[in-house]
Every structure is written in structure tokens, then in C-alpha cells.
């Protein structure tokens, strides 16, 4: 399967909102409500921030929200803070217990 | 508190076999589905495959990234609370940080710290 498509970069000022897209196909993003998002700071392991399209694990601020329309999922970060500067990756279930990641988006605050 | 820790050789020669182990502490491996994920330096994440260990049948089922399926094996050693990754015939392009991660609600909620494996002669 092919990697999901994310913009290489995104940016916003402190306090603003930014949305990162993740585009797949009807075989992955569009076919299942099993999209997850990860935040990765340099030299660190990724951290789960959204699962099942729009759910937040315990401890993740509600500034992070997820949604999906058709074959495209989106992550919105509201009220940007300096610590939100990181790489963000989407992941989708693709059937048959297969998972696929997006190429990643570098968010600059 | 459940933790994952990768271990193994950090340097592998081209065409040889990469072998890594993920040790689960603070919980039983039989309760989880576990994946291996890798990340070449400066690049994105790639899901490699996952294993589910059934307590009832005492057997493991696996699924692999189709692009790696012929060269990757993931297995479980339940007695030692470990699962392992083997990749045969590696190339320099497979130099990467390798992570083990716990599958949870179709995401990955717990990650090891990662281990850098360099493929070089």
C-alpha cells in the first residue's frame, strides 16, 4: 500500500490554529474510522494524540482535535503553543490488519 | 506501568540479518498486540508488522507490511515477555531507528525509546 499524503510543512503563530491534512484512499482513510495522529519531538519516540479519527487519549489537551471527510483526515491544533512545534504523522488502518503512515508534517510555531 | 524496551545489535552488514528484541515490563505480553515501526534518519515512520499472541491457543498470528513481507519475521517469546523482529538481506537504506509499540484501538499508544540500527560494511 502507498503512504498517506501529508503536507511537508505547516506553520502558525502562537495562539492561532493550524490544520494538517492526511489524504489516503477508500482502502484506508476513507474505508475505516481508524485514523490516528502522532506528535514527535526531535530525538523522541512518537506520542499518540488522536485515535479513531477524533478521540483523545487521557492527558492530551483538547487543543488537539481530529476529523475526517471522505478520504482525507485532518488534525487541528488550536491555541498554538511553542511546545506544539514538532513533526506530526497520521496513520490509518488499511484492512487485513495492515497499517499505513503518512509522510509527516513539520509544524513550525 | 507498562514499558517497552528495544535491544539488539546496532551495526549490521549489508545482506545480513537484522535481529531485535522488545522486552515488555510491568505487564504481560499476552494481553497486547505489538508492532514494529522504523524511521530512517530524517525521514518518516514506516509500519513493518505486528503480532498477536493468543493465550487460549498459545500461538501467535502476524501481519506484515506487504512491501517487507518476504523478508520480515515477528515472533513472540511469552515466557520471557519479549517479542522479536528479524529482517533478512538488509541494505543500507534500512538504516533507521527501530521502535516497538503497543497496538491500542487501532493506534499505537505506548512506544519504546527506539534503537538505532546502522547497516554498513
Image (spheres, coloured by chain):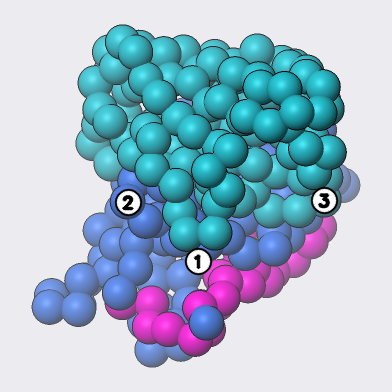
The x and y percentages for residue A83 are: 80, 43
Q: Secondary structure at mark 2?
A: loop
Which mark identifies residue B105?
Answer: 2
Q: Nearer the viewer, mark 1 or mark 3?
A: 3
Tags 1 and 3 on a common chain: no
Q: Quadrant of the C terminus of chain A?
A: top right
The x and y percentages for residue A55 are: 38, 43
Classify mark 2: residues with Cα within 10 Å, few (<14), some (14-19) or many (20+): few
Per the image, the residue denoted by label 1 is B84
Residue at the image point whose x is 20% and y is 78% from the top: B55
Q: Chain of mark 1?
A: B
Ranked by sequence position, the earlier of labels 2 and 1 is 1
Classify mark 1: residues with Cα within 10 Å, few (<14), some (14-19) or many (20+): many
Q: Nearer the viewer, residue A86 or B70?
A: A86
Per the image, the residue denoted by label 3 is A43
Classify mark 3: residues with Cα within 10 Å, few (<14), some (14-19) or many (20+): few
Amino acid at each position: 500500500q502507498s503512504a498517506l499524503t501529508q503536507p511537508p510543512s505547516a506553520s502558525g503563530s502562537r495562539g492561532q490554529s493550524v490544520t494538517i491534512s492526511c489524504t489516503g484512499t477508500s482502502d484506508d482513510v476513507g474505508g475505516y474510522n481508524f485514523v490516528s495522529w502522532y506528535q514527535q519531538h526531535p530525538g523522541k519516540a512518537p506520542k499518540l494524540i488522536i485515535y479513531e479519527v477524533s478521540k483523545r487519549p487521557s492527558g492530551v489537551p483538547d487543543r488537539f482535535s481530529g476529523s475526517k471527510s471522505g478520504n482525507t483526515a485532518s488534525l487541528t491544533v488550536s491555541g498554538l503553543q511553542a511546545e506544539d512545534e514538532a513533526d506530526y504523522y497520521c496513520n490509518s488502518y488499511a484492512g487485513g490488519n495492515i497499517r499505513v503512515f503518512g509522510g509527516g508534517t513539520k509544524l513550525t510555531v | 506501568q507498562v514499558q517497552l524496551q528495544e535491544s539488539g545489535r546496532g551495526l549490521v552488514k549489508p545482506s545480513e540479518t537484522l535481529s531485535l528484541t522488545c522486552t515488555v515490563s510491568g505487564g504481560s505480553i499476552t494481553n497486547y498486540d505489538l508492532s514494529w515501526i522504523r524511521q530512517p534518519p530524517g525521514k518518516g515512520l514506516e509500519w513493518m508488522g505486528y503480532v498477536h499472541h493468543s493465550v487460549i491457543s498459545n500461538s501467535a498470528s502476524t501481519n506484515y507490511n506487504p512491501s517487507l513481507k518476504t523478508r520480515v519475521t515477528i515472533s513472540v517469546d511469552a515466557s520471557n515477555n519479549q517479542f522479536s523482529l528479524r529482517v533478512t538481506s538488509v541494505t543500507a537504506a534500512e538504516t533507521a531507528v527501530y521502535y516497538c509499540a503497543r497496538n491500542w484501538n487501532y493506534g499505537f499508544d505506548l512506544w519504546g525509546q527506539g534503537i538505532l540500527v546502522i547497516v554498513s560494511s
